[in-house]
Image (tube, rainbow, N blue to C red):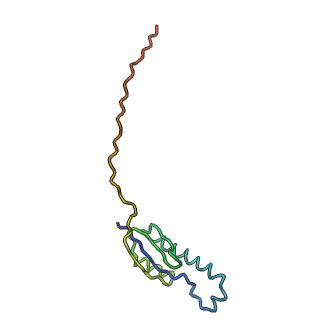
């Protein structure tokens, strides 16, 4: 299968009104980190995901093999209340395959030493 790079924008805001947010400024930063970890747990638990990382504050970059981006976005919408599919592209390997010449193993010739016989009398 082909590796895919999927970029999804996810809301990391708490969803509180302005009055609540002013009262709970200390909880806002902690809630943002919990939302990030919750979103990453959802993405990593999805079938076929190889790696997931945060890009900026609200984008998640997912690299996977045979991942359905629409189903992944739908799952994030269900649990995080807002998710937008930004892009899906084929992941290209950075490693270039070089032509390898076959390995020629040197042949070592060991001359056999004459046996030494011990005569017991």
Where residue 23 appears, as percent x and y from the top left, is 67, 88
- Of 16 and 101, the residue lying toward us: 101
Q: Is residue 114 above or below residue 39?
A: above
State which quarter of the image contains the N terminus. bottom left
* Location of residue 86 by image quarter: bottom left
Q: Is residue 104 left or right of residue 17?
A: left
Where residue 100 appears, as percent x and y from the top left, is 34, 51
Q: Is residue 70 above or below residue 45?
A: below
User: Residue drawn at (64%, 82%), measured in percent from left and top?
Assistant: 27
Disc count in the image? 0
Query: Which residue is situated farthest in the top direction here?
Result: 121
User: Residue drawn at (55%, 76%), measured in percent from left and top?
Assistant: 36
Q: Is residue 93 above or below residue 33?
A: above
User: Residue drawn at (36%, 33%), measured in percent from left and top?
Assistant: 108
Where residue 76 appears, as percent x and y from the top left, is 47, 79
Q: Is residue 28 above or below residue 40?
A: below
Q: Is residue 23 left or right of residue 53?
A: right
């Amino acid at each position: 299968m082909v590796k895919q790079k999927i970029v999804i924008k996810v809301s990391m805001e708490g969803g509180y009104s302005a009055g609540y947010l002013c009262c709970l400024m200390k909880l806002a930063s902690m809630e943002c980190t919990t939302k990030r970890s919750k979103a990453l747990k959802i993405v990593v638990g999805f079938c076929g995901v190889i790696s997931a990382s945060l890009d900026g504050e609200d984008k998640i970059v997912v690299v996977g093999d045979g991942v359905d981006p629409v189903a992944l976005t739908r799952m994030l919408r269900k649990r995080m209340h807002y998710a937008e599919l930004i892009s899906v592209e084929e992941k290209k390997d950075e490693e270039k395959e070089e032509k390898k010449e076959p390995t020629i193993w040197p042949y070592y010739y060991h001359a056999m030493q004459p046996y030494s016989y011990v005569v017991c009398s």
